[in-house]
């Protein structure tokens, strides 16, 4: 008699960020996540006056509670494992070492996988959020790639030969904190520093720059597509209006954006020349909202800087956008967990 094939494994997946906690379900090996519950994160953005340790405690309690609720939902097959995408750097054994968007300043190292496994009684896989997002593309990209998120900040991970390249203590993938403008009054970074790539080429950084450009050149601003929506007030320019103007080929908005993206092009050129990665995927709200405009301007700057040994066509071909949805981390952490379930000795995933 032919043996029945085992049923595909069901996973509960969670993605906790500074604003939103999403908890859903995914079938191992599949790329569609379902029954996603979204709640506001009980962290810094909601209770900003509490001490970091209290915020960390709240975040962890909420994460445990929401995952337990998803596990207990009626009408669902039992889940074999839990996988969590966490917004913070972590060690190779699943200890979160910082949570700047979740609890702000220093708090105790948080062994997320161990704590959740103790409460839930299931194998738990945990990875940094950019690592999780990169795993979404691991099965469809045929060569090593660098995934970069460009939203209010910038983060990156390089994926090669089935794993993320990072240090066991959580270093690696923090190109957003590379100093690109050493001026004392350079744009502030969310880490507390100034002039970092994530402070210049992110959505927040580009907005900071276009407002400064509007203040510095009032005539050009007055004749741009940004003047109307902002009422002629530089500080009233919104990210939405800026993105719309850049996409509509407004010269003032595009040239400001081009200057902001220049150091990101330098980062791509540096990564290519240093380690030879030829595939750069961009996700994150700002990059995806700009769409082709983002790729065109970044490509222009990358061609201008040059990638040693590549012609213009090959240089532009290195850049691509990821899927335009909010599911990168949920799908990716599900893919990572499915891969790790084939090697059950690992409970926590590398950062
Ligand atoms: Zn920084």
Image (tube, rainbow, N blue to C red):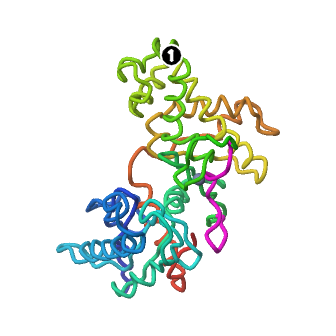
- Residue at 33% x, 84% y is 120
User: In the picture provided, is 58 more to the left or to the right than 142?
Assistant: left
Q: Is residue 7 magenta?
A: no
Picture layout, residue 289 above or below residue 20: above
| Residue 264 figure quarter | top right
In the image, residue 224 lies at what x, y percent? 46, 15
Mark 1, ligand 1, within 8 Å: the answer is: no
The quadrant of the picture occupied by the C terminus is: bottom right
- Residue at 62% x, 66% y is 163
Picture layout, residue 258 above or below residue 29: above
> Would residue 146 be visible to someone looking at this image?
no
- Residue at 56% x, 53% y is 155
User: In the picture provided, is 23 more to the left or to the right than 252?
Assistant: left
Q: Secondary structure at mark 1?
A: helix
Picture layout, residue 21 above or below residue 233: below
In the image, residue 130 lies at what x, y percent? 52, 58
> Would residue 345 be visible to someone looking at this image?
yes
Q: Where are the magenta residues, as a range?
A: 165-181
- Characterize the local packing of mark 1: few (<14), some (14-19) or many (20 or more) Cα atoms within 10 angstroms: some
In the image, residue 90 lies at what x, y percent? 55, 71
Residue at the far right: name it: 309
Q: Nearer the viewer, residue 79 or 115?
A: 115
Residue at the far left: name it: 74
Q: Nearer the viewer, residue 238 or 246?
A: 238
Residue wearing tag 1: 218
């Amino acid at each position: 008699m032919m043996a029945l094939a085992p049923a595909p494994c069901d996973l509960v997946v969670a993605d906790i960020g500074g604003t939103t906690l999403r908890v859903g379900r995914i079938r191992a090996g599949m790329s569609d996540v379902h029954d996603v519950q979204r709640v506001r994160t009980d962290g810094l953005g909601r209770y900003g006056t509490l001490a970091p340790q209290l915020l960390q405690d709240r975040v962890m309690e909420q994460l445990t509670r929401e995952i337990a609720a998803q596990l207990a939902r009626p009408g669902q097959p039992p889940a074999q494992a839990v996988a969590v995408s966490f917004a913070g750097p972590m060690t190779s054994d699943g200890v979160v070492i910082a949570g700047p968007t979740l609890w702000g300043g220093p708090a105790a190292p948080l062994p997320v996988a161990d704590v959740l496994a103790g409460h839930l009684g299931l194998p738990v896989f945990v990875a940094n959020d950019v690592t999780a997002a990169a795993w979404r593309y691991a099965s469809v990209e045929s060569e090593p790639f660098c995934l970069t998120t460009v939203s209010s900040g910038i983060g990156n991970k390089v994926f090669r030969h089935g794993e993320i390249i990072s240090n066991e203590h959580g270093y690696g993938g923090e190109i957003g904190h590379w100093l690109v403008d050493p001026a004392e009054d350079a744009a502030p970074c969310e880490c507390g520093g100034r002039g970092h790539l994530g402070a210049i080429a992110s959505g927040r950084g580009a907005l900071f720059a276009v407002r400064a450009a509007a203040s510095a050149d009032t005539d050009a601003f007055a004749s741009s597509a940004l003047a109307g929506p902002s009422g002629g007030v530089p500080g009233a320019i919104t990210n939405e209006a800026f993105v719309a103007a850049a996409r509509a080929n407004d010269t003032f908005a595009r040239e400001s954006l081009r200057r902001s993206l220049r150091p990101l092009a330098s980062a791509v050129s540096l990564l290519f020349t240093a380690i030879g990665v030829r595939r750069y995927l961009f996700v994150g709200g700002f990059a995806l909202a700009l769409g082709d405009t983002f790729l065109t301007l970044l490509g222009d700057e990358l061609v201008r800087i040059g990638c040693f040994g590549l012609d213009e066509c090959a240089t532009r071909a290195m850049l691509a956008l990821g899927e335009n949805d909010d599911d990168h981390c949920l799908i990716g952490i599900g893919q990572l967990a499915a891969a790790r379930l084939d090697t059950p000795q690992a409970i926590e995933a590398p950062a």
